Image (cartoon, rainbow, N blue to C red):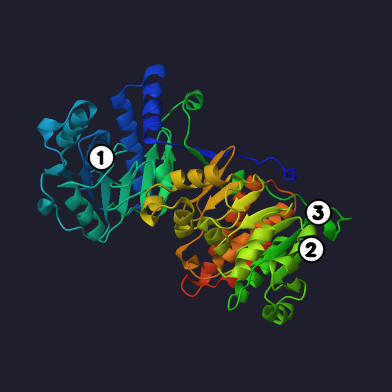
Amino acid sequence: MERQNLAPIPAAEPQSLYSAAAVRQLDQLVINQQKIPGLALMKRAGRAAFDCLRSRWPEVNAIQVFCGGGNNGGDGYVIAGLAAQRQIPVTVFVGVPVEKLKGEALEAYGFAEREGATLVSTIDAMPAAGKNTVLVDALLGTGFSGALRSPVDAAVAHINGAGVPVLAVDLPSGLNADSGFAEQAVSADVTVTFIGRKAGLFLGCGPALTGDVVFDDLGAAAEIYPQVQGMLLRHTAETLARLPARTADSYKNQFGHVMIVGGDHGFGGAAMMAAEAAARTGSGLISLATRPEHVVASLTRRPEVMAHPVVSGQELEPLLEVPSVIAVGPGLGRSPWSEQLLARAGRAQAALVLDADALNILAGGRVLAGIKRDDWVLTPHIGEAARLLQISNAEVTADPLAAARAIQEKFSGVVILKGAGTVIAHRDGTDVINTGNPGMASGGMGDLLTGVIASLIGQGMTLPAAARLGVWLHGEAGNCAAADGQRGLLATDLLPHIRALVD
């Protein structure tokens, strides 16, 4: 079914996120085309990080800098030298012997030494971090992959165990700049990143390790960036297409008819929550196809929802001719009843949103085998993604971007791989959205997201635009609901905030 995006053009462009290799290309373009020497860029990076540190922690009275051997370490030595110039006591862990330092990193080491920074070569020689001490992680840069080796592993453990604020230079050491994967890594309060935003800061473990991400282009000219291909786009509130305002003569049939299919024995609440989320997002009409025993509870909780008892796929069939979008999966279960409903819904003419056990059944290969649809949205978490690809959870976690793209290639449509950095893969590219909070790790949250996305599609948004806006609405509603605390946050706590945010 062809759909038009009725929302206005976003006011801002999404942020391009780059691979480590692409950032190195950007560096070279700045050096070669703008004639800015590498040492000058290193000094700019060090000063940007130092200024950020002073702004974030104005009461700092001691700084400890942990330096590796590459340009990242060089940035750290510049920070140490600047601190020493300002009479701030600074101790530097020299992670690579000075005789092995080269080029700009060696020159930066000399600057720190001349300015009087205290240089130590073992972690045991680092003083205990006192009050108003800030630690600076400049151990590893964008070229890191694999496992940490000595002495970096000990330095990372020391930083994480110090109990004081941490600023990471470019990215936390131990974090993969491309995938966001980390086995052992620095946990920072602030990360100052340069030239190009690294994809790994916003994927996988990245959002849990970076703290606040501060970007500085170090004076790179705007015309540099179109010359290098980014990995994906990061959307924020300012870059998302939104639903248009309703006119005074609006009527319900203009705003879509969403049908929720699910609610097997014992799982009726999931389908009801998805239906209510669609209603609170603004759908004109909501239907629910569920087990007969859930109908009374649905009518009692939300009488605006048209609840239909269905005991087989055959009974569902005539109901599928009416809705403009069908969401299958909340509370669906994995029974023969569940498979029948998915099989019938999966061949309907309306757009589809599949979640939860609809994805698990799809992964099993007996229902909708080999089907690709451009007009469906798949919303897996890590475990469901692994089953769809027949790989391990660890493989999905190691590279969520690759996993989302692989699912999209296998099934077509739009794929939303949920996480702290939610990846949205579609025919025209890949996006990431970072929002929400750990309090949302509770039952029913995915059911709400399914209802929200289905509602936005029914109201006329394209599938990619609905996916992006739906993920943002869901996460921001979670943040609003967590204002009084994250523990004990319930899915239904988000509903009033979804309603407020969608306008």
Along the line of sight, the residue nearer the viewer: 131 or 26: 26
In this rendering, position of residue 46 left or right of residue 488:
left
Q: Which mark is residue 495?
A: none
Residue at mark 2: 318
Whole-angstrom CA distance, mark 2 to mark 3, is 31 Å
What amino acid does circle 2 point to?
Pro
What amino acid does circle 1 point to?
Gly
Which secondary structure lies at badge 3?
Answer: loop
Whole-angstrom CA distance, mark 2 to mark 1, is 67 Å
Which secondary structure lies at badge 2?
Answer: helix
Does label 1 or label 3 sit earlier along the sequence? 1
Residue 118: x percent and y percent?
14, 44
Residue 276: x percent and y percent?
68, 69
Q: Nearer the viewer, mark 1 or mark 3?
A: 3
Residue 128 position by quadrant: bottom left
Q: Above or below — where is 102 with respect to 360?
A: above
What amino acid does circle 3 point to?
Arg
Q: Which mark is residue 246?
A: 3
Q: Quadrant of the C terminus?
A: bottom right
Residue at mark 1: 76
Residue found at x 72% / y 45%: 7
Q: Check whether the beta carbons of the residues at disc 2 and disc 3 lie within 8 A of each other.
A: no
Q: Nearer the viewer, mark 2 or mark 1?
A: 2
Residue 459: x percent and y percent?
75, 53
Does label 2 or label 3 sit earlier along the sequence? 3
Using the rendered image of the protein, determine whether residue 331 is visible from the camera's viewpoint. Answer: no
Which secondary structure lies at badge 1?
Answer: helix
* Crowd tier of the residue under label 3, counting other residues whose Cα lies within 10 Å: few below 14, some 14–19, many 20 or above: few
In this rendering, position of residue 91 left or right of residue 78:
left
Along the line of sight, the residue nearer the viewer: 321 or 235: 321
Residue 333: x percent and y percent?
56, 69
Residue found at x 18% / y 34%: 109
